Image (tube, rainbow, N blue to C red):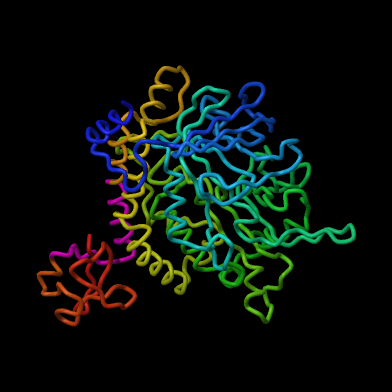
Amino acid sequence: MRTLFILFLSVLTGATTLGVSAAEMPEMRIFFEGSLSRGMDYVNGSMQLTDTNGDMVELPAKFKTRGATASHYIMKPSLNMKLRTPDYEEEADSALLGMRSCSSWILDAMAIDRICMRNRVAFDIWNDFSRLPYDTDFDGRNGTEGRFLELYINNEYYGIYCLSDRINRKLLNLKKTQEEGGAVKLRGVLYKSGTQEISNQDEPGYNEDSTACVIEWHNAWELTYPEDYGGLQVWQPLLDAILNGRSTDYVKRYFFLQNLADYQIHVMALCIGDNWGNKNHYFSIRNMRKDIDAPDPADADRRRFVITPWDLDTSFGGHYAGDYYDGNYADWPVNVIMNNVPYPISYLAGDAEYLALLKQRWEEGRQGAFSVDSICKKLERWRDLFIGSGAWQRMTEHYDAKMSRPKYVSDLAHEIECIEKWYKGRFSEMDDYFDIDGGGEGVEALKAKGMTKKGDGAGGVYNMAGQLVNAGTLPKGLYITGGKKYVVQ
């Protein structure tokens, strides 16, 4: 009967699965003593995770509430989850739902995101578009990976969550801290922009154990790795960069330009207002002990900074309190973003090399990860899972009956349609800014020019890599024929 209902719902909403099961969503149940509370520190418990095949894994785990949002949305809080050995004394890695094996996980409530997918979709776009400028065991991934599930806490239903891994030393392949003869040898470092560990951020200073630092007025950071060795030595590379690295030459020397250009394109294209400044990103260095002037370029690269995004809830015109929806979205113009760039990109704002790279990266991204078609498919994939599984109806009905509620919309399909319309406008705005001629010509227009087969007509059709392509089956993107650019839309 449930399967028939879901099939009927799919027909009614026009939903298609796009490769995702329309009938099932994984389910997690977590248990711990006591009840949820604001600022809850780690408590011992366990988790049961059942995948869509009905296979279940049960593991000891510790849980705590996380983030500023949790203090306002305790009815649907985000949680940190650490898998442990049966005695809870040590970490225990496990691969969950096909993701990389690790012990520390996030249960993201998405309590201010009315579609419960902005952060995940924006990270998936970032992972498609940008990779670390060096090899890792995880294919150079520079962002989180996640899976949606329905969560129960102490047998009470809490709705749709996203289980994701974390930005950490292993993912970014940072060198481990060493202890030799009682001395600590710091190597890899990972800094997170923004912190609640220091209440007064008007003046420079550290928290009690020096694992959080205010570098200058309202420019605060947390030490994510190594978290047990706070102090001036571990903070020195970041202090030097922000306080003394204020020049184009310094930024070009100590940062990877493409990594910065990718981050800027990501913020611009998705209008991620909450990530453009002194919060919601990471800086990392693989090995702070390496010499930036080392004769071996590989050694010098190990001393350079990498930027990694974090907390992308305000993407796609979203709002930090969930106030924008139903076609009313943040409209932070692209040109305004370009005129209000934070460190270190601020010192590249007039650099011809960087600006050319920025345009190049948009030209490449608009044909792939940032194409309208690619982004709509991502949004629709999760829309269809949420609706087809019945999870969206279960969650909205659950919270409709409560006095305190997170942010959500009743008509998810309508909201996704509005966001897709918004992004099509944003895509055109990006093209206008970078002076890319959309041309407005699709496959049929190119066919009319006689170029229906590979190599036919006026020298053929080429992609932006200079490769001859079949004009009769062109995917959306930018192409060149007869010495002119055309866009297939």
Q: Is residue 327 left or right of residue 318?
A: left
Residue 268 picture location, percent across and down? 41, 55
Measuring from the top left, give residue 454's x and y in whole percent: 20, 76
Q: Is residue 57 left or right of residue 440?
A: right
The answer to whether residue 435 is magenta is yes
Residue drawn at point x = 32 percent, y = 63 percent: 367
Q: Point out residue 209 in the picture as x, y percentages from the top left corner.
A: 78, 44
Q: Quadrant of residue 67?
A: top right
Which contiguous range is marked in magenta? 421-444
Residue ID at (9%, 70%): 448
Q: Residue at x 49, y 46 (%)?
A: 146
Q: State whether residue 277 is above or below residue 413.
A: below
Q: Is residue 106 magenta-colored?
A: no
| Image point (56%, 71%), residue name | 252
Q: Quadrant of residue 305?
A: bottom right
Secondary structure mainly formed by the magenta segment: helix
* The C terminus sits in image quarter: bottom left
335 is higher (above) or lower (below) than 255: above
Judged left or right of residue 244, residue 99 is: left
